[in-house]
Image: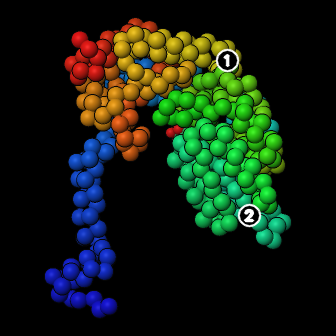
Amino acid sequence: MSISSNPATSEVADRKFGRLGIKQLYTALEQELNQARENKTFKSEIPLDDKQAGIVSVNGKTQVMLASNNYLGLANHPRVVSAAQFGLDMYGFGLASVRFLCGTQKIHLELEDRIASFLGMEAAILHSSCFAANEALFAAILSSDLGFSDYRDIIYSDQLNHASIIDGIRLSRMVAKGTELKAYPHNDLAQLQQSLKQDCETVYRIKMIATDGVFSMEGEFAPLSELVDIAAKNDALLVVDDSHATGVLGKKGRGTPEHCGVHGRVDVITGTLGKALGGAAGGFIAGKKPLIEFLRQKSRPYTFSNTLPPAVVCGTLEAIKMIEEDNSLVEKLQHNTNYFRKEIKNLGFKIIEGIHPIVPVMLGEAAIAMDMSDRLLKEGVYVRGLWYPVVPKGEARLRVQISADHELRDLDFALSCFGKVGKQLGVLSK
Ligand code: PLP
């Protein structure tokens, strides 16, 4: 193949042989973006004027925030903010290092201990995000030979698991080529057990079962009491990403395991600091000591990425302290959630039933979800729509997220707007 110096011929050659010059690359990217705009899958951002809270401001207009993961309202709580300010004053803005060089302060170790004891686990290791934690976990464990000259591992993964679990597993299968993946239908334990039974004749070195604790598109939780038993019976390591449940579910906010009566019995829990636990950023993996110590040696996102800033560490420590001190925030969240779930159904909307503060209001067509979220924003309710390909075709929805930072009057205002806009769009009968 020769590269022509004639621009016209060169363009033909480029198309024919599938090359993109830099200029054409930008054109192709523009075309993709325009396509996404046409398909209404283009994600746009609506900037907030100031802080994240139950009530926010957008372009000077007050909005009831129903789209954030600020479940306990700690993202802007005075105690968390002042702890973060203390962290800034005492420990500085950043550490300019990864953990093992010079990026560990006593507060990082304290936060790891605090997370572990909050979750009833032996130890925990911080990462820059839960996404990074999930990328770290599978690859670190499955890529090590652990003294085996030849081996095969297998991961059973719920089909609706979060993107970070999916990518973590993908990465592990790139580095450990023999690793098999079996994605089981969402929460289908019969299918999972059948696969485990079928595979029991095959010698796998490590078996893992991976699931979200709470599935973020639905607000449903994984049946962890059964999963703990299934994992134990099959000698499989159970990994639960509890990002949407830590600080949210369970009497004391300790997450899906507490809610399901198996607190301290899940092998590995991954989670985020970016939702209920203050909402800043950061993630963790919690589990038995040897696993966590091993990850300190082998997790690439831990080894080659910067430590968490002190303000975030101190703010998160305070957030956990507040949740441990008393149940009032968790109880308020649960009370608000029950109230909204009951009242939105009374208005005539269809929701996915459950108990989680994620309340999917089902609308069917993407166009209605888009229109409804735009109109609600004009009324003073900030809520985002989800549609295909994020959720199945015909299952477009508004994903409402309730917070302990809401007062009942805020929820009543939002509900009245839902009623008004629902009637305007013919979702509700007049
Ligand atoms: N896991 C789940 C289930 C999530 O919902 C999210 C965030 O949306 C993440 C992981 C990623 O968390 P982080 O923002 O800490 O990377």
Q: Quadrant of ligand 1?
A: top right
Q: Toward which corner of the image does residue 308 lie, by quadrant?
A: top right
**Residue 350 x, y percent position in the rendering:** 40, 21
Q: Along the horizontal axis of the image, is 382 left or right of 275? A: left
Q: Of circles 1 and 2, which is in front?
A: 2
Residue type at mark 2? Arg
Residue drawn at x 31%, y 45% is: 41
Rendered view: 385 above or below 292: above
Q: Which residue is mark 2?
A: 152
Residue drawn at x 64%, y 44% is: 191
Quadrant where the C terminus is found in the figure = top left
Per the image, label 2 sits on a secondary structure element best described as loop
| Circle number at residue 322 | none
Q: Toward which corner of the image does residue 426 lie, by quadrant?
A: top left
Quadrant where the N terminus is found in the figure = bottom left
Rendered view: 227 above or below 346: below
Foreground pick, 61 / 397: 397
Residue type at mark 1? Lys
**Residue 261 x, y percent position in the rendering:** 74, 24
